[in-house]
Amino acid sequence: GAQLEPNLTPGPGLRPRLETTLKLAQQRPDAAVVVSGGGSRNAPEAHEMARWLLAHGVTADRLILEDRSATTRENAAFTVPLLSSLGVGHVALVTEAFHMRRSRMLMSIVLRQQGLGEVKLECVRAPTRNLKAARREAPVPERDLRYQAKCWKTAPRPDLSGRVQGSHAWVQG
């Protein structure tokens, strides 16, 4: 995930996602903004993402927090019920290019599992500044993604009472 700095501010991997989310929120003033991610320190990442977005002009009534996820899979699993309760028809998923295929695949699977396969899923690329993570994730072969998808489809649903870490900004409108 894109972790927080020791002082609990967005780190170099998270800031571009927030900046991209802010631009989308400004372009789509009626959209809710869902921030997703827990944290292993004193504050879940979703709380600090919301604080950053508030400081940059997004109003509190637009923000919805998912602060329990520990993985990208849980980001999707815990976010989709929130989106479902909002009755969304369109979701813009914000993350870096190196993380997009896996994030899109997992979100698509969870949307279908939750009966929301008709929801339009738009992927919006944030600039990549976290080169270490990009090098770690970029060369994921297609066969590995197919294997992850197969495991996800056949695995039991995740325990929704789990701990938190990870981070994504999900904007829906």
Image: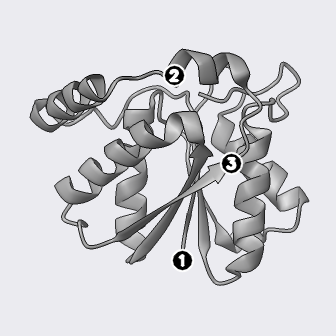
- Residue 53, how many percent across, how many down? 80, 57
- Measured in 3D between alpha carbons, the distance from the residue under mark 3 to the one under mark 2, in whole angstroms, is 15 Å
Label 2 – label 1 distance at C-alpha: 29 Å
Q: Residue 136 at what x, y percent from top left?
A: 55, 15
Residue type highlighted by circle 3: Ala
Q: Residues at badges 3 and 2 in contact (C-beta under 8 Å)?
A: no
Query: For mark 2, what is the residue?
Result: 137
Q: Secondary structure at mark 1?
A: loop
Local crowd size for mark 2, using a 10 Å CA cut-off: few (<14), some (14–19), many (≥20)? some
Res 22 → quadrant: bottom right
Q: Earlier in the sequence, mark 2 or mark 1?
A: 2
Query: Is label 2 in contact with label 1 (beta carbons under 8 Å)?
Result: no
Q: Along the polypeptide, which appears first: circle 3 or circle 2?
A: 3
* Mark 1 neighbour density, 10 Å: few (under 14) some (14–19) many (20 or more): some
Mark seen at residue 126: 3
Query: Where is mark 1, residue-wise?
Result: 173
Residue 37 visible to the viewer: no
- The three-letter amino acid code for the residue at tag 1 is Gly
